[in-house]
Image (cartoon, rainbow, N blue to C red):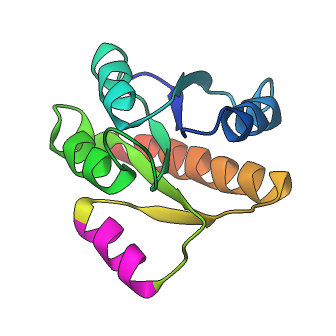
Amino acid sequence: MSSSLLIVDDDPFIRKLIATTLEDTSGFELVEAADGVEALERASAQPPALVLLDIDMPRLDGINACRRLRASEHGEAMTIVMLTAANSDNTQQRARAAGADLFLTKPFSPLDLLQLVDDVAADRVRTAAGDN
């Protein structure tokens, strides 16, 4: 499993905002995808450690993409964070049932994004240290 972070959002502005916020600070190699289909292709070629996944996208929405990422060969090792403007309980329940780990509600602050990625990275280090 690589230490890449897959940014999946159909809005190029959101992808750029996330990439700009995380570049040179996150410790992850950043990979981008514009929709769920592209996300599956990118994840197949280079399985990410962390996925930031928008829910509302064309071709393949985030919930179905999440379900398919979880079912993939490296799916259990990924941390999947759903990005959503719709913070309803129903949306979160559907996303959790598909395998989502965490949620970040749009609009989010760059500081909240950095904190979330730092927390996930720290959890991965603790988990790896405990596996030895």
Image spot of residue 4 (x, y percent): 51, 25
Q: Is 128 above or below relative to 27?
A: below
Image spot of residue 26 (x, y percent): 71, 34
Image spot of residue 47 (x, y percent): 35, 25
Residue 62 is left or right of residue 115, and the answer is left
Residue 97 is left or right of residue 63, and the answer is left
- 92 inside magenta stretch: yes
Image spot of residue 105 (x, y percent): 63, 67
Looking at the rendering, the stretch of residues picked out in magenta corresponds to: 89-97
Report which quarter residue 16 is drawn in. Answer: top right
* Residue that sits furthest to the front in the current view: 58
* Residue that sits furthest to the bottom in the current view: 89
Depth check: 26 or 35 in front? 35
Depth check: 103 or 13 in front? 13
Q: Is 68 above or below relative to 87?
A: above
Question: What residue do we see at 25% from left, 61% from top?
Answer: 98
